[in-house]
């Protein structure tokens, strides 16, 4: 191993191959659930250097764990505890390489922080719509590696739909340049889609060409109080019919989720917090004018109040008020962490089945664990819920996690499967769900996935133990 480290230092320079000191920023996951031990943390500054690192590791038979901003939630981007894996940090590869206004594309490196991509697009007069709570620290490569979703999937799609091309270093250290930016290229297998969502198990994404959109003339946000999940789904149907393609966001938040925000962030104002079982956050973008958007929005909310699928509603009067409403939504995850350790689920269900799923899963959980608290919120518009389970009030969080995490996951995932859903909507599989995947993916699908892994990474060195068992 000392020989490999010497070769890595010769290729990248001593300062970019770290083996001593505090490496916790790379070795510990964002939720602080797991910490591994890297043989070395290597920080390449170019695609050529990434390729050189991969070639050296392949020759030595050493596993590689690619890492972006280390904001993942499924322990998929840190080394294991063996001390034998190289952690490949892409943080230095953070340039926006090009913006093509006529083609409506932006090409950026994998280590580019998502917020920086958004800002570069905005400075050029365009919108890059991928938006996540961690956008100030997550990176484009990680977003693509997990096929991240976020709050505007309803209108613009996941990271996969926004991606036109990739640059990838293969497990053999070759470079595939697929950064064409073409919207039509029907010349065989779509290699891009193999790597998007593969969580670094098939190769290292080093750059991407992404779609841009015109900036909307106006963007409006509203908050509606709804009496139950059926009403939230009915309101979504009204929003689809009333707003059409201008509907960009539709988030649902349960009362307990919002109560945690009030408890841990009392400076934030939560609309209708005491009177509503659920809150819905709606966003629409209009390319005509703010007046046109506001008129549409107000007609929609009036109809919702008349039909009874909303009991109250408010439209943000300024960008600052809109930001405050979104801040409440984005603070749920932080408030939940303040409340204590919890069992997280990132699931997708057909929208029509979400009310029945929630009733069934809640009833089963309460029978199994009296007093358990459900932090139910998420992107209702695209069927993605963060159906998280908090220990009963006063219970010991770590003990609850140790005793109940596996039984609760089994209960929730079995219920998800009954309703035709997926156990991972946007967070990925990582190592946390790798044992569950064989129970919820067909043998045919798993066989195809293993065949792809074997064909592209026959040594099994790319992020081993993630997505699929070795």
Image: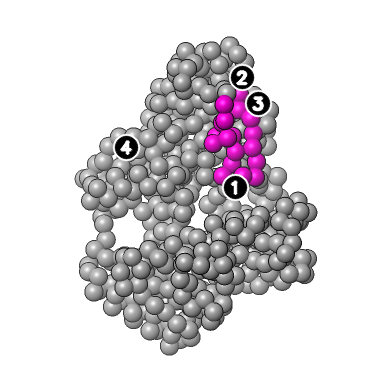
Relative image position of residue 448 (x, y in whole percent): 61, 40
Which residue is depicted at the point 55% across and 49% down?
Answer: 427
Q: Relative to 437, does residue 94 appear above or below in the rendering?
A: above
Circles 1, 3 touching at the beta carbon (< 8 Å): no
Answer whether residue 22 is magenta in the image. yes
Nearer-N-terminus badge (2/3): 2
User: Is residue 121 toward the left or the right of residue 271 in the image?
Assistant: left
**Label 1, label 3: how far apart the Cα atoms are:** 21 Å
Q: Quadrant of residue 46?
A: top left
Numbered tag placed on residue 31 in the rendering? 1
Answer whether residue 269 is magenta in the image. no
**Residue annotated with mark 4:** 96
The way the protein has been coloured in the rendering is one colour
**Label 2, label 3: how far apart the Cα atoms are:** 14 Å
Nearer-N-terminus badge (1/2): 1
**Residue annotated with mark 2:** 61
């Amino acid at each position: 191993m000392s020989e490999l480290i010497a070769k890595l230092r010769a290729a990248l320079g001593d300062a970019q191959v770290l083996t001593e000191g505090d490496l916790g920023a790379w070795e510990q996951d964002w939720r602080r659930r797991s910490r591994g031990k890297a043989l070395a943390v290597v920080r390449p500054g170019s695609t050529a250097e990434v390729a050189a690192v991969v070639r050296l590791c392949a020759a030595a038979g050493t596993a590689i764990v690619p890492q972006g901003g280390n904001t993942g939630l499924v322990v998929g981007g840190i080394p294991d505890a063996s001390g034998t894996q190289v952690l490949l940090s892409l943080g230095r590869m953070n340039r926006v390489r090009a913006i093509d206004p006529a083609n409506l594309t932006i090409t950026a490196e994998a280590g580019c922080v998502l917020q920086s991509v958004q800002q570069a697009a905005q400075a050029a007069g365009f919108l890059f719509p991928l938006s996540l709570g961690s956008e100030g620290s997550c990176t484009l490569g990680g977003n693509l590696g997990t096929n991240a979703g976020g709050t505007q999937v309803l209108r613009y799609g996941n990271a996969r739909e926004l991606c036109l091309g990739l640059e990838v270093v293969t497990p053999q250290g070759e470079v595939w340049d697929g950064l064409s930016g073409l919207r039509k290229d029907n010349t065989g297998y779509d290699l891009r889609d193999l790597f998007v969502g593969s969580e670094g198990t098939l190769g290292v994404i080093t750059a991407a060409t992404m779609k841009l959109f015109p900036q909307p003339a106006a963007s409006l946000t509203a908050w509606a109080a709804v009496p139950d999940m059926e009403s939230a789904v009915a309101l979504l149907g009204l929003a689809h019919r009333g707003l059409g393609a201008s509907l960009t966001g539709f988030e649902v938040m349960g009362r307990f989720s919002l109560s945690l925000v009030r408890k841990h962030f009392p400076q934030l104002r939560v609309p209708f917090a005491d009177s509503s079982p659920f809150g819905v956050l709606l966003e629409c973008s209009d390319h005509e004018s703010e007046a046109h958007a506001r008129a549409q929005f107000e007609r929609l909310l009036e109809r919702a109040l008349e039909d009874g699928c909303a009991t109250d509603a408010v439209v943000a009067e300024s960008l600052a008020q809109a930001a405050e409403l979104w801040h409440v939504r984005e603070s749920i995850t932080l408030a939940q962490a303040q409340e204590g350790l919890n069992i997280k689920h990132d699931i997708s269900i057909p929208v029509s089945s979400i009310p029945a799923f929630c009733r069934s899963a809640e009833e089963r959980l309460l029978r199994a664990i009296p007093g358990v608290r459900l932090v139910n919120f998420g992107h209702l518009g695209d069927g993605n819920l963060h159906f998280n389970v908090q220990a009963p009030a006063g219970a010991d969080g770590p003990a609850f996690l140790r005793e109940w995490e596996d039984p609760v996951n089994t209960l929730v995932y079995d219920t998800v499967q009954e309703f035709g859903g997926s156990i991972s909507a946007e967070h990925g599989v990582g190592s946390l769900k790798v044992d569950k995947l064989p129970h919820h993916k067909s043998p045919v699908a798993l066989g195809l996935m293993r065949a792809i892994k074997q064909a592209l990474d026959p040594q099994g060195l790319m992020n081993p133990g993630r997505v699929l068992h070795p």
